[in-house]
Amino acid sequence: MSVLLGALLPYAGATIAVFLLWRFLRTKHPYVLLAVIYLAVFVLWHLFNALLLGWQAGWPHGIEAWVATAILYVSGVHFFLGNYTCIEGETPSMILFTLIEEAGAEGCGREAIVRGFRELGHVEERLDTMQSGGLLRREADGTLSATRTGRFIRWGFDACFGLLGQEETTDD
Amino acid sequence: MTSWIVESRILAPSLLSFAAAIGLHIVVGRIWRRASLRSVLGGPLAAGILLCALWLWVRPAGDHDPGRIAEAVAALALYAGLAYTVADLYGFHRTAIRLRALRLIHRNGGAATRDELLRVCGHEATVDQRLAQYLRSGDLVLVDGRYRMARRRILHITRGFRIARRLLLGTRPGRL
């Protein structure tokens, strides 16, 4: 029980804190801020738990319980961060489905979908975000090149795809 | 190591079932190269859940421990968390615009112009890729040149995220 409580209670607390904070503070793609909030709530929760309850209720006992708690919590945080772009409505799939849904029962043609994407400026914004986020940099000749972080991310993903035995361009 | 595997109540069942699922995924992926992502990833991960549940069921230690159910739930939750992480990183990011842009730059020898990136990763390419992907998976159908949702599941997911956006952000960004 201590593992479940040790992960789920601070997770619920951090999620509620995000919902409350977002009433006042709202930025686009706040992934680092979200990660900091979730980490801070986890640490504070267990610190207060230790100080106020004397390491009793909801406190993971032993290294194994702590590792399990941490993995469970990080998985939950990853779930929230991974779906935050969908909540913002800015993944290509969410834009596609929303455009089709808004078109109603008769459906939506390809040109209208492309026009919808173009109006949102989705792809240009992604490239800008990659530059501001340190994945791409503009060279003196105007071309874009990958930073060390960008190269590492591409290498990491492609290594995983290769290891798992599927082509990088295979679609589902 | 052996005693840890036998005595562990949460980590060993979830981690070893997860390792078995990834191993099964690699084998299936290499043998059946043209399989869909759902078959090649979903199948082994679902098999891992069964393996984890079976492990927890047959494990002799702690039969009368009142915390056993909570530990079993924790182990299954841990497995689900790990499985989701792999499914997300491997499945959902595979066609991501960021990754396609980084690959194009890599293939071009380290640099690409913005126009080249927009041509390969641009609106039309992104839309065509997603439409082909969801037609193949059966989530969309093409009727008289117009795309419609074929499954209510997708409609519910779209509406669920819209409700979450209203609750969290309180707005409808852009036209969405």
Image: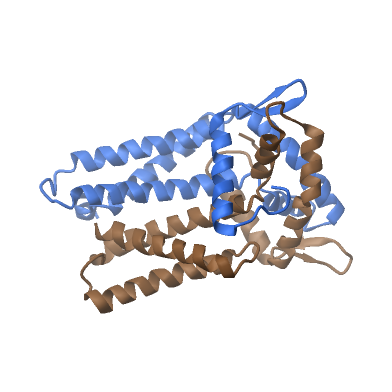
The residue at 26%/67% (across/down) is: A59
Name the colour assigned to chain B in the rendering.
blue
Query: In the displayed structure, does residue A28 sit left or right of residue A54?
Result: right
Q: Is residue A77 above or below residue B84?
A: below
The residue at 13%/51% (across/down) is: B65
**Outermost residue toward the right in this view:** A141
Q: Is residue A46 above or below residue B11?
A: below
Coordinates of residue A133 in the picture (x, y in percent): 68, 66
Closer-to-camera residue (A60/A150) = A60
In which quadrant of the rendered view does residue B54 lie?
top left
Q: Is residue A58 above or below residue B66?
A: below
**Outermost residue toward the bottom in this view:** A51
Colour setup of the view: by chain
Q: Split into 4 quadrants, where in the image is the N terminus of chain A?
A: bottom left
Coordinates of residue A48 in the picture (x, y in percent): 32, 76
Query: In the displayed structure, does residue B29 sit left or right of residue A1?
Result: right
The residue at 27%/79% (across/down) is: A51
Closer-to-camera residue (B118/A110) = A110
Closer-to-camera residue (B125/B17) = B125
Residue A74 appears anywhere in the view: yes
Colour-to-chain, brown: A
Closer-to-camera residue (B63/B8) = B63
**Outermost residue toward the left in this view:** B64
Query: In the displayed structure, does residue B154 sit left or right of residue B126?
Result: left
Residue A162 appears anywhere in the view: no
